[in-house]
Amino acid sequence: MTNLHGYPEPRQTTSAQETQARDWAQARLSPYRFMHSEGVVETITRLGTHYQIAALPALRLAGWIHDAAKELPPDELLALAEALGCAIRPVERACPDLLHGEVAVALARRDLGIDDPVITSAVRYHTTGAPGMSQADRAFYLADLIEPSRSYAWIMQARALAYEDLDVALLFVITYQLRRLLKQGAIIDPRAMELRNELLLSGVQFVLRQP
Ligand SMILES: [Fe+2]
Ligand SMILES: [Fe+2]
């Protein structure tokens, strides 16, 4: 059996809680963003199976909810973050989109009663990464970037690396993401730089193949 993207469906049962989270997210998202979320769930299932990550069921739930606040306008996102009691860093006040994971965590807690630390952490850090991420967080961060509907110049290399070594893949995609942001003159979340430094300081390396 194949899925929307033409890949064989990984064998994974869908729990009642997952169905509830999927329906909740679908009601909040455009068809495009919902398809992305489906892609993240498929991809984290593959990666989680490949690396035998015990928290895979929680990560599948994270896949459904992670972008639930992504399509809110910046002023609404900021207001909602304040109303839900999220801690807001200066960089997030300047770029409210950085808050969409944190707000999704708060909404899922409020609406679905989801308070699992594995889910919370994966959703919270999926946008920028952060130092000290768990293996589950790292796999989830990559699943968000390499799911089938994504298309970057470097996507094929990132997809291949993700199944070879999570840390090398992570360093690779973060470096390309930061290069893109620097070229755009965008504000950069220090968490992304801290994660990149953490990887480099622990000896992770990759060869930059594209200009
Ligand atoms: Fe996101
Ligand atoms: Fe996403």
Image (tube, grey):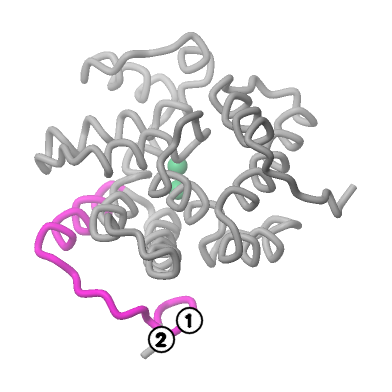
The x and y percentages for residue 158 are: 66, 58
Q: Do the residues labelled 2 and 1 touch (CB within 8 Å)?
A: yes
Instruction: Tell me the SS state at disc 1.
Output: loop
Going 53% across and 67% down the picture, which residue do you hit?
A: 148
Q: In which quarter of the image is ligand 1?
A: top left
Looking at the picture, does residue 50 appear above or below residue 60?
below
Decide: is 178 above or below 17: above
Q: Name the residue under label 1.
A: 7
Which of these two is toward me, 32 or 67?
67
Q: Earlier in the sequence, mark 2 or mark 1?
A: 2
Q: In this view, does 53 lie above or below 125?
A: below
Figure disc tally = 2
Could you say which quadrant of the image residue 108 lies in? top left
| Among the 4 quarters of the image, the one containing residue 55 | bottom left
Disc 2 marks which residue? 2
Along the viewing direction, whichever of 1 and 52 lies nearer the viewer: 52
- Tag 2, which secondary structure? loop
The kind of residue tagged 2 is: Thr
Q: What stretch is highlighted in magenta?
A: 3-28
Q: How far apart are marks 2 and 1 (CA)?
A: 5 Å
Please determine whether, in this image, residue 42 is positioned above or below residue 106: below
**Image coords of residue 186 (percent x, y):** 68, 24
Check the image and name the residue furthest to the front. Answer: 203
Judge from the rendering whether residue 103 lies leftward or rightward of residue 93; answer left or right: left
Give the x, y percent position of residue 146: 56, 59
